[in-house]
Amino acid sequence: MSGNRLYLSVSLLLSVGYFWLGWSLMQPEPKHNFTPCLFKNVTGIACPSCGTTRSVLLITKGHLQEAALTNPLGLLAAIIMLTLPAWLLYDFFRREKTFYNNYSIAERFINKNKKIIIPITVSLMLGNWIWNICKGL
Amino acid sequence: MDSQKVDMYLMTNAKFFSPAHINFIRERLLAADDSKWGLINSVDVKDPTTVLIVSIFVGYLGIDRFMIGDTGLGIGKLLTGGGCGIWALVDWFLIQDATRQKNMEKLQMYL
């Protein structure tokens, strides 16, 4: 993936994420039942990352433990949404490509060890999925 | 490389590359040295149809992106559950072209 396309898609994803988070925060209680998840809308059961929004919303209120219990991916999403904008802005103003270079290094590293990393990540996600279904998210 | 070899290569492998690249590959292969024949044949090209089938069944986990070597996007797709399902759906239509593009990149290293 070329540098500019990476920056464009990451900033697009981040802005969609912030827009979605802001919209969810503004909803009055009781919470709405709308979900953008196609899998859940079609099958009625949770997908591996269902509950991430609820988890991030709990983090904004300071309930870290409940957030991790709702969906551990929420913690990851919160970390990414807090750090990446700063990193992208740093690159933008300094006219450097530190994010792209690190992305390439990480991609090469994962490619080199993909026989270990990918099965582990996929099985973690599958485990999370089973947990999600058991929790009835 | 003699044209018979090049035509044989293109006949067996044309479906792995986008039609727009075939002429370029042919020209570069004709100009390439005979000693590269083994290397070029050993390039690990992926079949777009197989990747499409993988994408339809386990696109939610990003396996299709891992398969063609887009590891960064694969991890992104895995962690977001196929981008809320929307990215996984869009990828059904994009993955074949992405596969052909990746195959071209792999081959280009030896041309």
Image: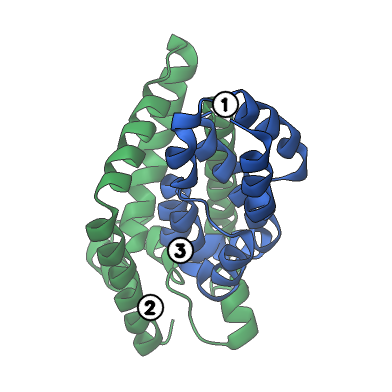
Q: Colour of chain A?
A: green
Image height of A30 relative to B7, above or below = below
CA gap, disc 3 and disc 1: 24 Å
Between residue B8 and residue A32, name the one nearer to us.
Answer: B8
Say left or right for A112 vs B45. left
The image quadrant that residue B72 belongs to is top left
Query: Three-letter amino acid code at disc 1?
Result: Asn
SS of the residue under disc 3: helix
Label 3: which residue?
B63
Q: Residue at x 58, y 77 (%)?
A: A39
- Please name which of the two marks, 1 or 2, marks the residue nearer to the observer: 1
Which chain is home to disc 3? Answer: B
Which disc number belongs to residue A4?
1
Image height of A117 relative to B6, above or below = below
Q: Position of residue A83 (x, y in %)?
A: 35, 36
The answer to whether tags 3 and 1 share a subunit is no
SS of the residue under disc 2: helix
Between residue B93 and residue A31, name the one nearer to us.
Answer: B93
Q: Residue at x 32, y 38 (%)?
A: A108
Label 2: which residue?
A129
Looking at the image, is mark 1 or mark 2 earlier in the sequence? 1
Chain shaded blue: B
Query: Three-letter amino acid code at disc 2?
Result: Trp
Q: What colouring does the structure picture have?
A: by chain
Image height of A115 relative to B110, above or below = below
Say left or right for A15 vs B109. right
Q: Residue at x 57, y 57 (%)?
A: A26
